[in-house]
Every structure is written in C-alpha cells, then in structure tokens.
C-alpha cells in the first residue's frame, strides 16, 4: 500500500523482491486511491502490507485517518481478502493502521518518554506465524514516536494463551553492547508485535526492511573484524540480515 504519507513502500517492495529473487518474485506498490477505484484488484494478491511512514502526518493520531479511509471504502474487500489463505503485515505506521482497522488487538500510543526514538532493538519471537517460521530472535531498527503498545491484563492473557504475541523486546546482543534499555517505548509486557487470524496477520513496530543485510547491523564491524582474525573458523560470514528472513518466510508460505 501507499499514499497520504506512507513512505517505506519502496524499501518494502525491495525487501520482497530481494527475498524472492530466485523465484523472480515481483511486488507492486498500489496507492490506496487506485485500490478504491478498482477494489477487485485486491483479489489478484496473496500478500497485503501496510508499510511504515507518517500517514496524514499523524495529525489525528497515528494510523487513524488512513485506517478510516480504508474502512469507509474497502471493508468488504478486506474481509474477503482475510477470508482467503492470505498474509497481511503492518509495519510501524502500518501496525498502527491495522490496529485501528480492528484486525489486530490493542492500540499504539505515545512513547513513554514522549519523544521520537530511532535506534536498533533486540527481539525474541514469542508466537507462531508463517511470517516467523524458524526465527527465534533478531535485531532490527525502530523509528517512531507512538510505538507504546497498550493492552489490558485480560487481553494479554488471551494473546499469550493463543500464541498471538509475535515479538517481545529483549536485552540481546545490541542492547548489551550499547548499554541500551530493552524496551525503549514502554510497551506493555515488552510487546513489539502481535498476531491474528492464526498468525497470518502480523503487526510490528520495528522495521525488518531496514535490517535486510548484515552490514546494516551496528555489530557488523565488530563481527567482520572477528572473522578476519579467524575467530569463527568453522562458520560462514552471513551477508543477509535477520530482517530479510521475515520476507522470505512470507514468500515461502505460498511455495507449492
């Protein structure tokens, strides 16, 4: 999706096409107005992604205006899309959009320290989803002012029971190395992403499309030096970043 301030669509398209390069996968950037004009177009796709950005300048609250436009014009088509064996993801502003659409539980509000945060975080995978197959932990960037995930204790118990918590912020390699707090925005129960529709719908505040290559990771120069010194003699140096695995999983879900 694109339009009205979403600004990570090019990176997201690149992520899918890089992940599916061997199968010559192509991804389309579709403006919301084009989809409203031709709503049946959604039937042509298997994956729908709401990328990051600042839709409508966040003037009425992050993701609310874009979600309302989508609901007012495309509610029937979205329900039909979700009824099929499809995948949906909302990344950062996209996560805020899908919670406002009501297809993911909880809500996003201002960071606990009331300021914009741009840094890397460590994540632990907590749920089950086609998006997360064979991923146990990863490190990717965040960049948001309203990433504080809010949910009640009762709702949290339901999410936990149903394996709907996709990611939790963790004190991993980057946080330890840079002496950073694990949960920078104060999200309830350290939640960084959630799931719905049996794991087919994913919402996450971090940006996996910005952690596609090993050299993007803040630890890369240290790891590179370790390889050059021969510290990892029996290991092959990875060129791909952990974020790319999420996009590969989505493509492989439809591999038949």
Image (cartoon, rainbow, N blue to C red):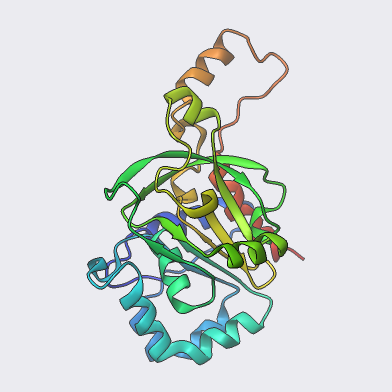
* Residue occupying image coordinates x 43% and y 38%: 120
Q: How many marks?
A: 0
Q: Residue 210 location in percent, x, y?
A: 43, 46
Outermost residue on the right side: it is 256
| Residue displayed at 68% across by 55% down | 127
Does 58 sit above or below residue 67? above
95 or 247, nearer to the observer:
95
Where is the C terminus found, in terms of image quarters? bottom right
Position in image of residue 40 (x %, y %) = 51, 90
Determine whether 84 is above or below 113 in the image.
below
Give the quarter of the figure containing the N terminus.
bottom left
Q: Is residue 201 visible?
A: no
Residue 83, image x and y in percent? 65, 84
Estimate the x, y position of residue 17 in percent, counting from the top left.
52, 56
Considering depth in this image, is 8 or 185 the residue closer to the camera?
Answer: 185
Most extreme residue toward the top is 229
Which is nearer the eye, 174 or 16? 174
Q: Nearer the viewer, residue 243 or 104?
A: 104
Question: Can residue 200 be seen?
Answer: yes
Residue 180 versus residue 166 in the image, above or below: above
Which image quarter: residue 45? bottom right
Q: Is residue 214 above or below residue 114?
A: above
**Left or right side of 139 for 62:** left
Quadrant position of residue 241: top right
């Amino acid at each position: 999706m694109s339009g009205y301030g979403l600004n990570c669509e090019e990176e997201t398209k690149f992520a899918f096409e890089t992940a599916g390069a061997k199968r010559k996968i192509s991804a389309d950037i579709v403006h919301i107005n084009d989809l409203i004009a031709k709503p049946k177009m959604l039937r042509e796709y298997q994956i729908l992604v709401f990328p990051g950005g600042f839709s409508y300048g966040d003037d009425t609250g992050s993701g609310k205006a874009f979600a309302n436009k989508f609901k007012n014009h495309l509610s029937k088509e979205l329900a039909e899309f979700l009824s099929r064996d499809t995948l949906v993801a909302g990344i950062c502003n996209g996560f805020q959009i899908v919670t406002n659409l009501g297809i993911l539980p909880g809500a996003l509000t201002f960071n606990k320290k009331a300021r914009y945060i741009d840094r890397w975080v460590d994540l632990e995978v907590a749920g089950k989803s086609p998006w997360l197959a064979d991923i146990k932990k990863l490190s990717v960037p965040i960049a948001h002012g309203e990433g504080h995930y809010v949910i009640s204790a009762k709702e949290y118990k339901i999410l936990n029971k149903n394996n709907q918590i996709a990611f939790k912020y963790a004190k991993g390699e980057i946080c330890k190395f840079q002496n950073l707090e694990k949960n920078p925005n104060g999200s309830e129960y350290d939640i960084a992403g959630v799931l719905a529709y049996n794991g087919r719908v994913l919402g996450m505040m971090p940006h996996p499309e910005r952690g596609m290559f090993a050299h993007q990771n803040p630890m890369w120069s240290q790891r590179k030096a370790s390889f050059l010194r021969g510290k990892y003699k029996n290991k092959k140096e990875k060129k791909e970043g952990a974020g790319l695995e999420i996009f590969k999983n989505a493509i492989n879900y439809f591999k038949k």
